[in-house]
Amino acid sequence: MLRTLYDWTMSLSRSPHALTALFIVAFVESSFFPIPPDVLMIPMIIAAPRRAFIIAGIATVGSVLGALLGYYIGAALFDSVGQPVLDFYHKSDDFSEFALKYNAWGAWAVLVAGVTPFPFKVITIASGVTGLSLPVFIVSSIIARAFRFFLVAALLWKFGAPIRDFIERRLGLVFTVFCVLLIGGFLLLGVL
């Protein structure tokens, strides 16, 4: 089923309404949809490199607005909507303990999840459930999602199709290692 959903999402990149589809996919991916907007962004940017940064901007805006829906799900609809989403991603068991410590590290959690392969929707919902400061949540979401989408756009704009394999297979790992090193460095320095 996931492969069918992936293929359907990928086919949207060839649609005349690809930018609208990208906005919608970025929006729903931040709150409940399992396929990341990169699936649409990559072929769209390869097909029209001059529009790379417009495409990244649309993905960023859609994703941040969708993150607000995720926050709302966590804050207002956790029992009826949020819990089933967490169950789908097998995150329910760890969630209770996670929520207790969340607000102290919430901005970092949003930043890390926003650029790594970790499901961003889990963090958006957790932010709402735990009552993370909404301004902190919004700023962290904007920074993380813009960094991720604009970096992908810049790489594709500069290098084109040859970098596609790197982005699809390894960029998530690079982001994860970067975040681990960044946070590890701060911990070593005693800043966090």
Image (spheres, rainbow, N blue to C red):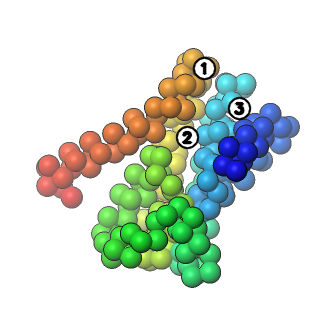
Side (left or right) of 41 relative to 93: right
Whole-angstrom CA distance, mark 1 to mark 3, is 11 Å
Tell which of 138 and 152 is nearer to you.
Answer: 152
Q: Residue at x 57, y 64 (%)?
A: 88
Side (left or right) of 69 relative to 147: right
Q: Are marks 1 and 2 in contact (CB under 8 Å)?
A: no
Q: Is residue 157 above or below residue 21?
A: above
Q: Quadrant of the C terminus?
A: bottom left
- Whichever of labels 2 and 3 marks the residue nearer the N terminus, that label is 3
Specify the amino acid type for callout 3.
Answer: Met
Whole-angstrom CA distance, mark 2 to mark 3, is 13 Å
Residue at the far right in the pictured view: 16
Count how many numbered circles sit on residues in the image. Answer: 3
Q: Please name the residue that numbered disc 1 is placed on.
A: 160
The secondary element bearing badge 3 is classed as helix
Label 2 crowd (10 A; few <14 / some 14-19 / many >=20): many
Q: Is residue 23 above or below residue 72?
A: above
Side (left or right) of 24 relative to 30: right
- Whichever of labels 1 and 2 marks the residue nearer the N terminus, that label is 2
Q: Please name the residue that numbered disc 3 is placed on.
A: 44
* Position in image of residue 75 (x %, y %): 53, 78
* Position in image of residue 41 (x %, y %): 65, 37
The secondary element bearing badge 1 is classed as loop
Q: Is residue 129 visible?
A: yes
